[in-house]
Image (spheres, rainbow, N blue to C red):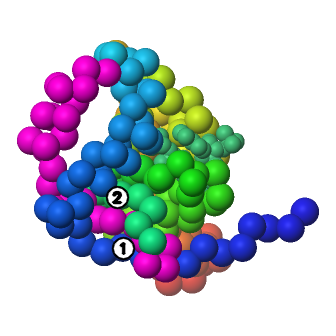
Amino acid sequence: MTQPAHIVWSLRPISHSDLESAYGLHKEAVGVYVAGTWGWDEAFQRQMFVDRFTLRREVIQVGREDVGVLIVDERPDELYLELVELTSSWQNRGLGTEILRWLLRRAEELQRPLALHVLRANPRAIRLYEREGLRVVEAEQHRFLMRSAVHDRRSSRLDARRTRRLCGLWRGGRP
Ligand SMILES: CC(C)(COP(=O)(O)OP(=O)(O)OC[C@H]1O[C@@H](n2cnc3c(N)ncnc32)[C@H](O)[C@@H]1OP(=O)(O)O)[C@@H](O)C(=O)NCCC(=O)NCCS
């Protein structure tokens, strides 16, 4: 089986002029899951989107094409994926997996878990996150909190040192 070709993507800062297209994308990407959870009231959803529109959003690009949005929050105890939405023509082509793996590598560098909330009404996204090693750690009424494991390199080094020391003792050497 051939592997899908690597997708070259990048991020650019969002601006206020992106608000309309970002709302269109939001509605297209998660509207069905929001509707399945709370129902979709257009006026309410629009107002909430405008109120919460933040310049912490980044636009995902492939070449010069805008294909999605991403919000990642680097918190002291975790790397939190607040939002990932891809336009429908870019879904199911491997891009989400690549972005997730990039975030997992970043979390690993920081020695923190990658965490996110996902709607219970979105089983396909849950499947993707599980496939990439995240696990449900908390079940809320409408959402799951999912988190990746932290492979603690520092404590592995300490463990290795401790093991060497114990081996030294066992052989009668100096710890
Ligand atoms: C979820 C999402 C970022 C995944 O990116 P992607 O590039 O489509 O994913 P990939 O091609 O790398 O992997 C395919 C997997 O993504 C998930 N996926 C694909 N389309 C999806 C969609 N419309 N909604 C949710 N998950 C989807 C599925 O697990 C799929 O695997 P499957 O075919 O075995 O079910 C993207 O599909 C998306 O933006 N979906 C709509 C918005 C959304 O659900 N965001 C996540 C909120 S927590």
Question: Which image quadrant for residue 17?
Answer: bottom left
Query: Where does the image place residue 121, in percent across and percent down from the top left?
Result: 47, 23
Residue tagged 1: 11
Left or right: residue 17 compared with residue 92: left
Q: CA distance from mark 2 to mark 1?
A: 8 Å
Q: Is disc 1 surrounded by few (<14), some (14 to 19) or many (20+) residues within 10 Å?
A: some
Q: Quarter-wise, where is residue 97 in the image?
A: bottom right
Residue segment shown in magenta: 40-64
Residue 1 colored in magenta in the image: no
Task: Find ligand 1 in the image and state its quadrant.
Answer: top right
In the rendered structure, find residue 169 and report the number of the disc placed on it. Answer: none
The response on whether ligand 1 sits within 8 Å of label 2 is no
Q: Which mark is residue 70?
A: 2
Which comes sooner in the sequence, label 2 or label 1?
Answer: 1
Give yes or no for contact between labels 2 and 1 (Cβ–Cβ under 8 Å): yes
The residue under label 2 is which amino acid type?
Leu
Residue 144 vs residue 99, the one in the foreground: 99
Q: Is residue 108 above or below residue 136?
A: below
